[in-house]
Image (cartoon, rainbow, N blue to C red):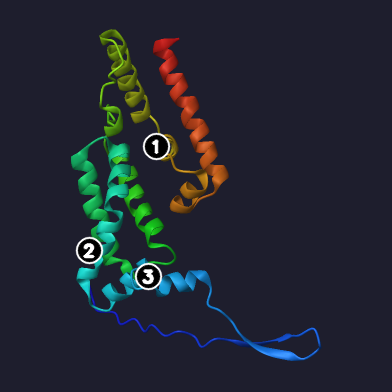
C-alpha cells in the first residue's frame, strides 16, 4: 500500500460568548464533541487507521485482532463451512487493507459490509444443503435418545430451509435470530433501514414456515 501521510491537527477551540443574567457576557470555550474525543484516543479505530496509512503496516493487526471473531462467526453462520468462512474473512481483510483510505465513518460497520457481501457473493454461486451452528452442536443432557433424534432431524431440516432462502433474507434472519443483534445495530452495520430489515426477517420467517410445513404439517 502506498504511504499516505495523515496530518492530524486539532481545530482550535471556538470562542463564543454567553450572556449572564446581569446582561454581561462571558467568554466560553466549545468542548470537542464526543465522537471527536473518541477518534483522538490512541487505541481508537480511527487512530489506528491513521497509523497504518502513515506507514505503520503492523498496526493493521490490531484491527484484525479486534474484529476477527465476530466477523468469522457471521461468515460461518452464513456459509456453514469453517474453511469458507476463513477464506472469506482473509480476503475481506485483504480488501479492507487495500482500500483503507476509503473508510468513512465507523470501521467496524465498513468491514462488516465487506464480509457480508463476500458471504452473499459466495451464496450466489454455491448451493449449500447444510448450515451448522456451533452453539447448537452440543447434545442436551436432558434429552432422551428419541428426543435427541427428533431435535437433530428438526435442526437439519431448518438448516436446509435456511440454505434455500435468498442471501439477503438469510443474512437478516441469521443476524437477528442467530447472532441476536438488534434491528438498530443491523441497520447500522448493513447501511439500511430498520423497516427494511424487519421486512426481510418477516419474509424469512414466512418462507421458513412454508418450507417446514411441507414436511411437518
Residue 25, horizontal then vertical, whole percent: 73, 90
Q: Are marks 2 and 1 in contact (CB under 8 Å)?
A: no
State the image quarter where residue 44 is shown: bottom left
The residue mark sitting in front, 2 or 1, is 2
Q: Which residue is mark 2?
A: 61
Residue under the point 50% across and 25% down: 206
Residue under the point 30% across and 82% down: 5
Give the alpha-carbon distance from disc 2 to disc 1, as whole Å: 27 Å
In the image: residue 95, left or right of residue 167: left
In the image: residue 179, left or right of residue 149: right
Residue under the point 38% across and 66% down: 103
Outermost residue toward the right in this view: 22
Q: Are marks 2 and 3 in contact (CB under 8 Å)?
A: no
| Quadrant in the picture for the N terminus | bottom left
SS state under label 3 = helix
Examine the rendered structure and indicate whether residue 160 appears above or below residue 184.
above
| Badge 3 or badge 1: first in the primary sequence | 3
Q: Which residue is mark 1?
A: 174
Query: Residue 47 or 37: which is nearer the viewer?
Result: 37
| Quadrant in the picture for the C terminus | top left
Residue 142, horizontal then vertical, whole percent: 31, 16
Outermost residue toward the front in this view: 22
Residue 22, horizontal then vertical, whole percent: 81, 88
Query: Residue 54 or 137: which is nearer the viewer?
Result: 137
Residue under the point 44% across and 65% down: 105
Give the alpha-carbon distance from disc 3 to disc 1, as whole Å: 29 Å
SS state under label 2 = helix
Examine the rendered structure and indicate whether residue 56 appears above or below residue 133.
below
Query: Residue 41 or 92: which is nearer the viewer?
Result: 41
Q: Which residue is mark 3?
A: 46
SS state under label 1 = helix
Answer few, some or many: residues within 10 Å of disc 2's Cα (few below 14, many 20 plus, some between 14 and 19).
Answer: few
Amino acid at each position: 500500500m502506498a504511504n499516505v501521510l495523515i496530518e492530524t491537527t486539532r481545530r482550535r477551540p471556538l470562542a463564543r460568548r454567553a450572556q449572564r443574567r446581569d446582561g454581561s457576557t462571558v467568554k466560553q470555550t466549545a468542548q470537542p464533541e464526543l465522537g471527536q474525543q473518541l477518534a483522538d484516543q490512541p487505541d481508537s479505530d480511527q487512530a489506528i487507521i491513521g497509523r497504518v496509512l502513515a506507514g505503520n503496516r503492523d498496526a493493521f493487526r490490531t484491527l484484525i485482532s479486534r474484529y476477527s471473531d465476530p466477523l468469522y462467526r457471521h461468515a460461518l453462520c452464513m456459509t456453514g463451512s469453517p474453511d469458507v468462512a476463513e477464506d472469506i474473512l482473509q480476503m475481506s481483510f485483504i480488501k479492507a487493507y487495500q482500500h483503507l483510505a476509503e473508510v468513512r465513518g465507523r470501521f467496524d460497520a465498513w468491514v462488516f459490509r465487506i464480509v457480508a457481501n463476500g458471504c452473499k457473493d459466495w451464496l450466489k454461486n454455491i448451493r449449500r444443503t447444510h448450515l451448522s451452528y456451533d452453539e447448537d452442536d452440543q447434545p442436551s443432557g436432558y434429552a432422551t435418545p428419541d428426543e435427541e433424534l427428533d431435535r437433530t432431524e428438526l435442526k437439519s431440516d431448518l438448516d436446509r430451509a435456511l440454505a434455500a432462502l435468498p442471501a439477503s433474507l438469510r443474512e437478516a434472519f441469521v443476524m437477528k435470530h442467530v447472532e441476536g443483534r438488534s434491528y438498530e445495530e443491523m441497520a447500522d452495520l448493513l447501511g439500511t433501514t430498520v423497516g427494511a430489515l424487519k421486512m426481510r426477517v418477516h419474509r424469512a420467517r414466512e418462507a421458513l414456515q412454508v418450507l417446514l410445513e411441507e414436511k411437518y404439517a
